[in-house]
Image (tube, helix red, strand yellow):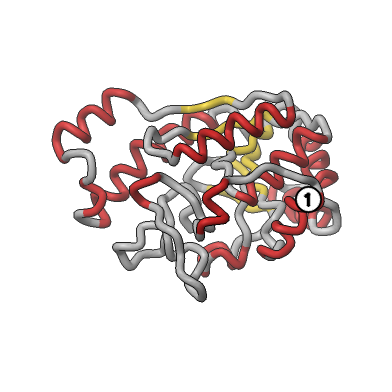
Amino acid sequence: MTDSQIVLTQISALEHLSLADGIRYISEQYPGKVVFSSSFGQEDQVITDAVFRNQLPIRVFTLDTGRLFQETYELMDATKARYGKSFETYFPATERVENLVREKGFNSFYESVENRKECCFIRKIEPLKRALAGADVWITGLRGEQSENRAAMQILEWDEGNQVLKYNPLIHWTYDDVLAYLQANRVPDNALHRRGFISIGCGPCTRAIEPGEHPRAGRWWWEASKKECGLHAS
C-alpha cells in the first residue's frame, strides 16, 4: 500500500477505538516514534491520564513559555504526584527571548498581530520543533468544536509544517465528554477553570470568558484573529 492508503487504513481503525486503545494502536504502528504535547488544559489532562494510567509507551512533553500562570505550574506538580511520572519540559531559546525583550519590551504582543505571532514563535513554535525532532506521530488534545479551523481536522492527518502525522484522539469529543472523563477518573485539572478560564495559555494573553462567549474568546482577546498561535495552523 502507498503511504496515503496506510494512513486511511489507520484512520478507519482509530475511529472505532477507545481513547486508550487508540493511543496503544498508534504506538504499536510507530514504536518509539510517538510523542504527546501537553499544555495541561483539560483535554490534555484526559490524554495524560490515558497514557500514564495505562502505562502506554508515549513520550510526554510540555512547553514552558516562561509566562505561564502559577496555577499551571501547580497543576504540573500535582500531575507528577498523581501518576508518579515525569515529562520533558522545553523552554524557549534564551538568546531569542533576551533579544525580543531588549528590542521590543516585555509586552510587544499587545501592539500588533505580527508582534504577537513573533512572541508565540519564539516561546512556543521553535521549542515545539525541537521537541518533535525524530518523532513520526504527534498526539494532541484538539477538539473539533473548539474552533472553525479545528472542526475541519481529522483524527489522523499530515502536519506539513512539522513533517509528522498529527493524531487528534479527542477530535470528535464534546466539552461535556471531557468534563465527564475528568470527573469519572478523578483527573486533576487547573484551578483557573473554576474561575471562568476555559482555554488557558500564557498569563498575559489569557482572560476569563463571560457566559455565552466562545471558549477561546479569552485567548488574545484584544485582536480579531483565528485565535491560534501557529502550533496548529491549517
Residue indicated by mark 1: 10
Q: Nearer the viewer, residue 216 or 1?
A: 216
Vertical placement of residue 178 versus 86, above or below: below
Q: Where is residue 62 shown, x and y percent of the image? A: 54, 34
Quadrant of the image occupied by residue 8: bottom right
Q: Nearer the viewer, residue 12 or 81?
A: 81
Decide if residue 93 is on the left or right side of residue 145. left
Decide if residue 206 is on the left or right side of residue 164. left
At label 1, which amino acid type do we have? Gln
Determine the residue located farthest toward the bottom in the rendered image. Answer: 212
Quadrant of the image occupied by residue 171: bottom right
Q: Where is residue 227 shown, x and y percent of the image? A: 42, 60
Q: Nearer the viewer, residue 132 or 140?
A: 140
Q: Nearer the viewer, residue 158 or 24?
A: 24
Q: How many marks?
A: 1
Vertical placement of residue 70 versus 182, above or below: above
**Residue at point 67%, 42% (across, down):** 188
Determine the residue located farthest toward the left in the rendered image. Answer: 103
**How many C-alpha atoms fall within 10 Å of the one at disc 1: few (<14), some, or many (≥20)?**
some
Decide if residue 116 is on the left or right side of residue 177. left
Q: Is residue 197 visible?
A: yes
**Residue at point 68%, 34% (across, down):** 34
Q: Where is residue 3 shown, x and y percent of the image? A: 70, 46
Secondary-structure class at tag 1: helix
Quadrant of the image occupied by residue 60: top right
Q: Is residue 166 visible?
A: no
**Residue at point 68%, 27% (across, down):** 81
**Residue at point 26%, 49% (across, down):** 109
